[in-house]
């Protein structure tokens, strides 16, 4: 039996709104993935440590607070510091289009904005795990 894809969903920083993260977590579960949700207000180091401990395939970050340009790259850096830079990081939330190139430059593999079909997120995660994502 093939191992389920394991995804860590996290809310970095002080953002207290998790509806989107919970919707994505449920959609990923509905598509057969195993989801670990870290809860609200996690530091970059806590997220990276949880990802390593849970042996996840992908990290999904959610932000509605406007702190994504600082918080998302900090997670990537924390993974590097812990020797786990091979775990792909994706992000979602209310993120302006003009911030997306910067986030990709800082190591975020893909950004999903409001209205993105959950099937697109699932397909991207599956392609990351297979190692054939095109972005």
Image (tube, rainbow, N blue to C red):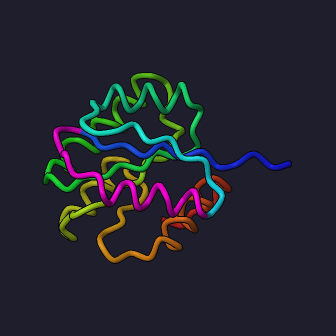
Q: Which residue is at the front of the view, 29 or 73? A: 29
Q: Which residue is at the front of the view, 61 or 106? A: 61
Q: Bounds of the magenta span?
A: 13-30
Is residue 12 toward the left or the right of residue 56 in the image? left
Task: Please tell me whether the stretch drawn in magenta is mainly helix, strand or loop.
Answer: helix
Provide residue 18's location: percent of width, then percent of height. Answer: 28, 52
Q: Which residue is at the front of the view, 81 or 42? A: 42
Residue at point 19%, 56% (across, down) = 64
Is residue 74 toward the left or the right of residue 126 in the image? left
Is 19 included in the stretch rendered in magenta? yes
Residue at point 19%, 49% (across, down) = 69
Residue at point 13%, 54% (across, down) = 66
Provide residue 35's location: percent of width, then percent of height. Answer: 54, 46
Q: Which residue is at the far left?
A: 66
Provide residue 124's location: percent of width, then percent of height. Answer: 54, 64
- Whether residue 121 is situated above or below residue 78 in the rendered picture: below
Is residue 121 toward the left or the right of residue 97 in the image? right
Provide residue 126's location: percent of width, then percent of height. Answer: 62, 60
Is 24 included in the stretch rendered in magenta? yes
Q: Which residue is at the front of the view, 90 or 15? A: 15
The number of numbered badges drawn on the structure is: 0
Q: Quadrant of residue 77?
A: top left
Is residue 29 toward the left or the right of residue 32 in the image? left
Q: Quadrant of residue 123?
A: bottom right
Q: Quadrant of residue 23?
A: bottom left
Residue at point 51%, 63% (across, down) = 27
């Amino acid at each position: 039996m093939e191992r389920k894809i394991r995804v860590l969903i996290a809310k970095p920083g002080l953002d207290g709104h998790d509806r989107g993260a919970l919707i994505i977590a449920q959609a990923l579960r509905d598509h057969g993935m195993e989801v670990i949700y870290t809860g609200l207000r996690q530091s970059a180091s806590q997220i990276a440590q949880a990802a390593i401990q849970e042996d996840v395939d992908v990290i999904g970050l959610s932000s509605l607070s406007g702190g994504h340009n600082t918080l998302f790259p900090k997670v990537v850096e924390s993974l590097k510091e812990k020797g786990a830079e091979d775990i792909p990081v994706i992000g979602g939330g209310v993120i302006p289009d003009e911030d997306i190139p910067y986030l990709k430059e800082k190591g975020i593999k893909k950004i999903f904005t409001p209205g993105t079909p959950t099937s697109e997120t699932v397909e991207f995660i599956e392609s990351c795990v297979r190692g054939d994502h095109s972005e």
